[in-house]
Amino acid sequence: MIELDEFAMTRNDFFWLIFRHTLTRFCWAYAYVAVSFIALMILHDDLAALLVILPGVLIAYSILHFITCRYYLPSAKETHCYQKRKISFDADKFHIQCEDGSESHILLSHVVAADRLCGYYRLFLNKINFSPVLVSAFRSEEDRLRFETEILGDKLKTKTVPLKAIFIFLLVTVCLLGTAFAMSQAV
């Protein structure tokens, strides 16, 4: 059995977990929007508009990303999300005991994936909902390593370079810019 020290998750920590979770998708969208605008500006032979319109669109998109993350953040009135909790893991389930006396027991087989982000392990129960576990709440480094290998095992996702996504982005970029350049020369 692995027992963790008591910890509380702050609203700010919760926001950064949500923000960082969606950041990769928004960054890819930024890149595709930028390439599309560059292709349009090449096509219309107006690169000055690129310097005015593109930063405005990207700033507006950044604000939208921030607002979207704030929307999904549990409100401060939902105190159960931010109260102190104590977590313990055994062979087949983990137990969460909150400071208000409530308890949850979740089978480890219900954890579909896990990752480490912003000082927390996120134990995903589906594609969206996760249970946060503070990395520094482990009582020893051996407990943390045992948690990663024995409890999570192959469910723990490690960050890798998305070669397929990079290749697709480069292919789309070459096609868009090449087409825009060829069409601007033909006119």
Image (cartoon, rainbow, N blue to C red):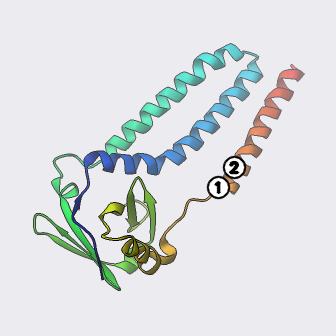
**Snapshot quadrant of residue 52:** top right
Residue 69 in the figure: left or right of residue 75: right
Amino acid at pointer 1:
Pro
Residue placed most toward the observer, 4 or 132: 4
* Position in image of residue 15 (x %, y %): 34, 46
Q: For mark 2, what is the residue?
A: 166
Label 1 – label 2 distance at C-alpha: 6 Å
Question: Which residue is located at x 74 percent, y 19 percent?
Answer: 44
Q: For mark 1, what is the residue?
A: 162
* Position in image of residue 74 (x %, y %): 26, 49
Residues under numbered marks 1 and 2 in contact, where contact means CB atoms less than 8 Å apart: yes
**Snapshot quadrant of residue 38:** top right
* Position in image of residue 61 (x %, y %): 49, 32
Q: Assign the N terminus to one quadrant of the image.
A: bottom left
Name above or below for residue 90 compared with residue 40: below
Q: Assign the C terminus to one quadrant of the image.
A: top right
* Position in image of residue 183 (x %, y %): 84, 26
Residue placed most toward the observer, 83 or 47: 83
Name above or below for residue 175 compared with residue 54: below
Residue 174 in the figure: left or right of residue 59: right
Mark 2 nearby-residue class (10 Å; few <14, some 14–19, many ≥20) = few
Question: Which residue is located at x 54 percent, y 26 percent?
Answer: 57
Q: Residue furthest bottom?
A: 91
**Snapshot quadrant of residue 129:** bottom left
